[in-house]
Amino acid sequence: MTDTPVQRYSTVAIAFHWLLALMIVASFCFGLYMADLPFSPRRLKLYNWHKWAGVTILALSALRLLWRLFHRPPADLPMPAWQRQAAHVTHWGLYLLFFAVPLVGWAYSSAAGFPIVLYGVLPLPDFVSPDKALADAIKPWHGRLAWLLAVLVLMHVAAALKHHFVDRDGLLDRMRPGRA
């Protein structure tokens, strides 16, 4: 590791990062698992949890983006220009998908006629009007975008691990919780 301390992200930024990471990975895994279940109360429960997670991810992503817009991240570490550019493109792709995946899922749920009742208490408005043809057209896009998000997450993780174990430049320490 480098001998000089690296600038860290704020505690709030770190909390948003890891909470969203955990929720996105869990939601993706739930989505894969529940998609092949036969119709049952268990499947309905998992679909509701998945929807709740999606709406929560959407809200947390909005808060995270607002935080990011008003709080500058640490300066970039020295690295080749192509790596810096790839990191910026990947980060903005992640942010875009943090919004697109849940919004497309919400649109599908609405078009399919399955309302979202957040945490079983708060009914959310339909994103689009019920329309079976529209639901059929939207459904595969939720999965495709989720897989694209998974690929970008894996790229993000691989790059962070490369910086930590190969470059030893302290990049990972900037986002690790509980490290001063």
Image (cartoon, grey):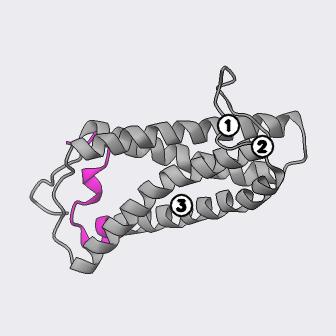
Q: Do the residues labelled 2 and 1 touch (CB within 8 Å)?
A: yes
Q: Residue at x 75, y 61 (%)?
A: 137
Horizontal and vertical percent position of residue 135? 77, 53
Q: Which amino acid does label 3 sit on?
A: Leu
Image location of residue 97, percent across then percent down: 50, 57
Crowding near the residue tagged with mark 2, few <14, some 14–19, many ≥20 C-alpha atoms within 10 Å: some
Dot 2 or dot 3: first in sequence order is 2
Residue 12 vs residue 167, the one in the foreground: 12
What label sits on residue 130 in the rendered view? 2
Which residue is the site of mark 1?
126
- Badge 3 is on which residue? 149
Distance from disc 3 to disc 1, alpha carbons, whole Å, reads: 24 Å
Q: Position of residue 143 (x, y in %)?
A: 67, 60
Q: Is mark 1 on a helix, strand or loop?
A: loop
Residue 93: in magenta span: no
Residues at marks 2 and 1, CA–CA distance in whole angstroms: 8 Å
Would you say residue 166 sits in the magenta stretch?
yes
Dividing the picture into quadrants, the one containing residue 51 is top right
The first of marks 3 and 1 along the sequence is 1
- The amino acid type, in three-letter code, at marker 2 is Pro
Q: In this view, does 127 lie to the left or right of 151?
A: right
- Label 3 crowd (10 A; few <14 / some 14-19 / many >=20): many
Residue bounds of the magenta highlight: 161-180
